[in-house]
Image (cartoon, coloured by chain):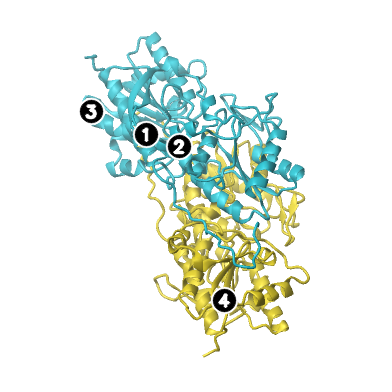
Chain colours: A yellow, B cyan
Amino acid sequence: MTELLRGKLLVGQSGGCTAVINSSLVGVVEEALSHKELQGVLGALHGVQGLLQGQIVDLGREARSTLKRLRRTPSAALGSCRYKLEEGDLEQLVQLFRRHDVRYFVYIGGNDSADTSHRLALAAADIGYDLRVFAVPKTIDNDLPFTDHCPGYGSIARFVAQSTQDAGLDTEAMKQYDPVKIIEVMGRNAGWVAAGSALAKKSEQDAPHLIYVPELPFDEQRFLEDVRRMHQAVGYVVVVVSETIRDGKGQRVGGESPYFVDSFGHGYYESPAAHLCKVVTRELGLRARFDKPGTIQRMSMALASPVDLDEAYLVGKMAVRYILEGRSDHMVTLLREPGPDYRCTTGSVPLAEIANVEKRLPAEFLSAEGNFVTPAFLEYATPLVGGAFLPYARLEKHRVTGSVTGL
Amino acid sequence: MTELLRGKLLVGQSGGCTAVINSSLVGVVEEALSHKELQGVLGALHGVQGLLQGQIVDLGREARSTLKRLRRTPSAALGSCRYKLEEGDLEQLVQLFRRHDVRYFVYIGGNDSADTSHRLALAAADIGYDLRVFAVPKTIDNDLPFTDHCPGYGSIARFVAQSTQDAGLDTEAMKQYDPVKIIEVMGRNAGWVAAGSALAKKSEQDAPHLIYVPELPFDEQRFLEDVRRMHQAVGYVVVVVSETIRDGKGQRVGGESPYFVDSFGHGYYESPAAHLCKVVTRELGLRARFDKPGTIQRMSMALASPVDLDEAYLVGKMAVRYILEGRSDHMVTLLREPGPDYRCTTGSVPLAEIANVEKRLPAEFLSAEGNFVTPAFLEYATPLVGGAFLPYARLEKHRVTGSVTGL
């Protein structure tokens, strides 16, 4: 039995928000409040950035009814941040932990947050302050290694899959007029979200018809050929593209230079979908329009995955159990059990192995042509969206004698 | 009692799709199939455009289970069109009706479709062919006159209101990093959809904070001042803009010239939201991003309004009852009953009074500053979205002693 450190637990949220990051927060808080050996449960506003400004709240004073509703509230209720640690920050954070008697730090976030957590654990050890640190995985990008998937992904995949059906039916009805639609979804370096758009497709006719992801170089000529061929075959085309796709030379499609660069060095560019619409209209003479659901896709509670909501809560709870057992400098992982029925348990992995490693779509999840996903991907991702999609219908369209076919 | 015309009923769908236009179709078909005096119930594929190519299907042969599921399937199951009648088309349509023994024509659509229906009624009368014509209102734009509102509007308003809450919570959590979000919604000449974004707002803090609609000239300097003031007051700003907003000289915000012009002469332009993001970042130094849900906003069945779905079905049924009673060259209208509880009955109005008239947001629904809606609008529109929004929670955030406030 590892010695229990006498002190408080502090939790923070970091990085891009998701529909389920508050489920993880509530998992952490409810589990921590159930451990009377903890001296308190605190929250950092806006992650380490707010923490550095001394922004700490007492989560033990929140109403249980608030926490209950928070499990079904998207975004990060504590506030989030994208903050790159500066010289002296780590020492300041450790001092702050000492002042507030914090011995347990749980950080809910993605790759950047795992890196921050790891560096904080190292800094505390250097200074000689007993601190246990745990990361809770959170990212719609689904790009953290070692975990089967990341909380947040199932919900954005559910939104994108359902919305692609919705937008696809729209294009199908308007195919004589607006035959091409390009849906731009999130995914800076990995195509997991774009791949998820295929999860509600039941027939060749259903959207999406083409998917382009950051893992593969984008070739405009091949793209145009794909669109033309699909238009001939289906009569309309729904294309899903990740927000970042690059050509063979590494140049971003749709923008030469970023109009903004964040503190992690991530650039923000023009919409590739808007650009590709113009290319399709100009080169193929087919009218194209685009949808860019933006932050709505990662925030939709109406289309959140019930499985994702439950798992997000679970990884929050487990972080507290693991940290109180004595584990530190680890991230909770989801481990898929073998067998025909989907089931995940949890484990943990050292942060040193996580930080700044990106898990991208593996080759076996991408079609040979590089413009769609494989059945192996669908098998992997289907359980994560948490159930069937809406049971839409199509008319049989029995032709009347003397009427024409082929439209 | 008006003489019953012996023949078939033909129904078509036209214009932009909605989440509930198939509910109207099923209302028409189920009601028509219950009238044994009708010789058949036919459907036109892709509206009058498909009809001119002889594309007619027998809706009486569709399974009842398909029709049932179709009531909850977005888009236009028969296919839609945007087709401007050409010389000779009307005569050709009347000939086609004669050939297929069609005596009743029901057209589900918006302003352009009402115009087409009216011209068809006049042409049949000119030719001396007994034809009864009825229009069923359908438009997310909510811009048809005489009807309290248009089927399709309640559902897009529900999607936009909920999504604005979702995206607003995202911006709130990321306010130190991404403090401004601009959501671009549909609405070519009328701001009903943008106005609907306010329907889930419960406090000053909630999104949206500013709304700009096509009814009022857009002044970039005043917009920047509004954003700066709101940022100071709330700490972040969510702006909702209609897809078309124009400056005082009538110039479109965000695009000089259309990149496409449709057959009705409607132009398609660059995104004003993308443009305004750059303006905010450049002029105020506040990072801004945009969401443009595009066709997803009008197609979402997961966020459709139950009231809208029911009313769409009702106006379909009533069109058949009215046309069989002998009314013709009319559109079904929704009439709000007086009294504290929301209730609509139906009526009808001559198409001659409808065609090409647009009902825009009246002055009493827009704030004096021209950047938000009034309580009168909320009172009008709240019943249309069909019930409460998701019960999201915020933390109380009790500050810990020794911690700082004001973030």
In the rendered image, residues at marks 3 and 4 fall on the same chain = no
The front one of A205 and A152 is A152
Instruction: Please report, as a chain letter, where disc 1 is located.
Output: B
Of tags 4 and 2, the one toward the viewer is 4
In the rendered image, residues at marks 2 and 1 fall on the same chain = yes
Q: Earlier in the sequence, mark 1 or mark 3?
A: 3
In the rendered image, residues at marks 3 and 2 fall on the same chain = yes
How many angstroms separate mark 4 from mark 2 (CA)?
Answer: 53 Å
User: Tag 1, which secondary structure?
Assistant: helix
Residue reaching furthest bottom? A1
Q: Is residue B320 left or right of residue B282?
A: left
Q: Position of residue A301 (x, y in %)?
A: 47, 54
Find disc 1 in the rendering and name its residue. Answer: B312
Find disc 3 in the rendering and name its residue. Answer: B35
Find disc 4 in the rendering and name its residue. Answer: A8
Q: Amino acid at mark 2?
A: Thr
- Do we see residue B105 in this rendering? yes
Q: Position of residue A100 (x, y in %)?
A: 63, 74
Image quadrant of residue B38?
A: top left
Q: Amino acid at mark 3?
A: His
The front one of B77 and B405 is B405
Of tags 1 and 4, the one toward the viewer is 4
Image quadrant of residue A215?
A: bottom right
How many angstroms separate mark 1 from mark 3 (CA)?
Answer: 20 Å
Instruction: Please report, as a chain letter, where disc 4 is located.
Output: A
Instruction: Please report, as a chain letter, where disc 3 is located.
Output: B
Find disc 2 in the rendering and name its residue. Answer: B18
The circle on residue B182 is: none
Tell me the crowding category of disc 4: few under 14, some 14 to 19, or many 20 or more residues within 10 angstroms, Cα based.
some
Q: Is residue B153 left or right of residue A177?
A: left
How many angstroms separate mark 1 from mark 4 (CA)?
Answer: 56 Å
